[in-house]
Amino acid sequence: MKNLFFIAFMLTILSGSAFSQDIKLPELKGYKKTTSYPVYLPENLWDYINGAADVYISYGFVDLHVAEYKKGKNVIKMEIYKQSDHTMAFGIYSTERSPSFRFLNLGSQGYTTADGAINFFKANYYVKIRTYSKNESTLKSAESLASIVADMLSGDSKMPSALSLFPETGKKINEEAYINESVLGHKFLNKAFKASYESGNDVFSIFIMENNTPEESKKSIEAYLKATGTEAVDSETGRYMLKDGYNGTIFLAWKGNRIVIISGLSKDQSDIADKYTSEMLK
């Protein structure tokens, strides 16, 4: 029995090691590459990013490769986070993105910040490159490294297809996100894409949830209705206006596998909610 446990343990270690070693960190001309960091896995990610590890793990974190590139006093640090799939990579990327950043044609989408950071995602990878140097040559080298890595990583470089479901009218640019757990703070609402909107002086958010079956959608709807004390209507589609104690007025609509939730509008703005939900539930 002890031998069987030992063999199983070793197979787990070896398979995990092989799975986590599928990235070859590139060279950068003129810089010395150092890779003294271990390959981080879910069980030791806390050792590297402390409390933020829980967020990455909630988005399907698989492993992390870290490298530093040094040239004199100038250092460029690179982190390649592998997530479980394309949606999860977009999700963790979207939690750290701001529409005020300068966006780049890099991977599926990328950006650079004023303090020397370059972040992008592609397929199921989220890449973060940073230098504290203000040297123009170093900053250009960091961008060059980002391009090399984006070309090196295999997989789809498109944005998640679900984002195309959001109507363009009034949508705020580069504010889309993916929330894997506890949408609007409710444990029974998960896996939603979100977009922010403006209509006149009103700012509101739209969430889209795509379930595997209509039954899954109905189960989530019933849980939300119960939590807000709203009477359910037995049908395969429905539109509701809920009073959510945490989020105020909520407009909710569903059809088949898809649920649309709108927050941020007042109860007398059902015409705006209906306009958007009708377009997304054709």
Image (spheres, grey):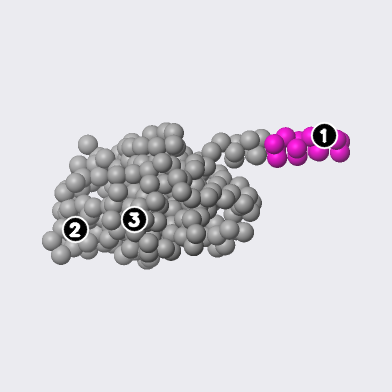
Task: Measuring from the top left, give residue 48's x and y in whole percent.
Answer: 58, 58
Direction from residue 79 to residue 158 in the image, left or right = left
Q: Mark 2 points at which residue?
A: 198
Q: On the rendered structure, is 45 left or right of 209?
A: right
Q: Tell me the mark number nearer the camera, choosing from 3 and 2.
A: 3
Identified at 62% across, 59% down, the residue is 47
What residue is disc 3 on? Answer: 112
Q: Which of marks 1 and 2 is in front?
A: 1
- Which disc number belongs to residue 226? none
Q: Is residue 156 shown to the viewer in this render?
A: yes
Q: Which mark is residue 4?
A: 1
Mark with earlier residue (1, 2): 1
The span from disc 3 to disc 1 (Cα, nearest Å) is 50 Å
Residue depicted at 22% across the width and 36% down the height: 282
Q: Residue at x 33, y 37 (%)?
A: 158
The reply to whether residue 220 is in sight is no
Question: Which mark sits nearer the N-terminus, 3 or 1?
Answer: 1
